[in-house]
Amino acid sequence: MTMQQSAQTIIEDSIRAVLPDVAVKRVLQNKQFPGNVYIVAIGKAAWRMAAAAGETLGEKMKAGIVITKYDHGEGSIPRVEVLEAGHPVPDENGVQASQKAIDLAVALQAEDTLIFLVSGGGSALFEHPLPGVRLEDIADITRQLLACGADIVEINTIRKHLSAVKGGRFASYCAPAQVLTIVLSDILGDPLDSIASGPSYPDASTSDDALEIVQKYALDIPAPIMEILKQETPKKLDNTENEITGNVTALCHAAEATAAKLGYRTLMLTTTLDTEARDAGAFLASIAREIKRSGNPIAPPCAVILGGETVVHVRGKGKGGRNQELALAAAKGIAGLSEVLIFSIGSDGTDGPTDAAGGMVTGAFAQCCQEAGLSIDAHLQNNDAYPILQKMGGLLTTGPTGTNVNDLTVLLCGVPGDGK
């Protein structure tokens, strides 16, 4: 098996291990519900989570709404309306879909239960601005936050204080009915008030936190919106129960297990990677050089595994995503090394505003770029990883996977069974 084939096997097995179907069914099979059951599912994995819930509940489920990213719906689900909307910047379709979820919530009876299925991407997809806030305001602020490299917790803190459904406000619509929230986590540390901006969980962030973020990144925000940011979100909810079904740690452990089966020694380096994408790529390349030179911190054939979510400070006008940029930056540092491969991939199958899930490079990549007249440095400076990876066969494309638990980055050094 080639290193590229090993990498593809690790990717496929890891993503399969964190698909939400089994986890959602496991949570629901032992639950008893006194009244009618309804579902609302939000996020990139919403369709798959809702389908699993529908299969488990059968006729007990009376109705439901799925709000997912464009092209992430996979067909019809009995008694469920499947709606698609914009991500990572919210759009009018998301607002209209969210209004339907609010209408469902306020019509619940005390004995009913709402099963709220949450996955990554829910913050953008599930949106209904507070009075006095326009969708255009939220979209503009979201773009500013993404461009300046704000992390997901910071982005969601702002979103929660501008939204009628985030920061615990959606659960308030459901009261006195109970809300069972099943979460596929895409945020490091699994903070329930931040995942999809915590629509059904008491908000730990404050208006002061939101204002500090505005100041930190010098965001351009109109004075009326600044006043709305000063309003507090719910700090206590009595009608909610939350269960986490999957996260990046599970993704990394699955990668580790597959790599071991393929004959690699494994090192789980971190599940909390959260630095600049190109810095992460350069750092991982330095580990590859050390392994090749000294066999430290682990001797070949080996797999070094990292999970988390890097950021990109967008300064150029190119096309790409954080995983593609990480891989391209790593290519510089592993230039000329034999039997070295690095890949980085988004578990949801999407990396930035592209159709790729990430990137894969080997020690030969830089030389091939040079021979083709392509400059890695120029593409990095323009945040333009996609075209060069595409031309050199380094793009990873999976299509929507149905899950979303951050990113997986793996360094492979050596080939099992070759005596090295």
Image: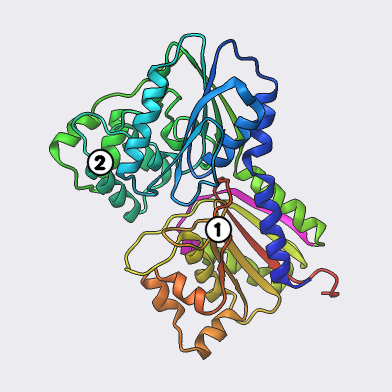
Q: Nearer the viewer, residue 174 or 263?
A: 174
> Residue 331, image x and y in percent?
55, 74
Q: For the point 54% across and 41% down, which residue is it?
A: 76
Tag 2 or tag 1, which sits nearer the N-term? 2
Mark 1: which amino acid?
A: Gly
Reply yes or no: does residue 277 show up in magenta: yes
Q: Is residue 22 above or below residue 338?
A: above
Residue positioned 54% across, 51% down in the render = 348
**Is residue 398 at all visible to an observer of this figure?**
yes
Identify the image quadrant of residue 6: bottom right
The image shows residue 327, relative to residue 48, as above or below, that is below
Kindly state the secondary structure of the residue where label 1 is placed: loop
Q: Which region is colored magenta? A: 264-279
- Image coordinates of residue 330 in percent, x first then y, are 54, 70
Q: Which residue is mark 2?
A: 135
Contact check, label 1 and label 2, Cβ < 8 Å = no
Residue 157 visible here: no
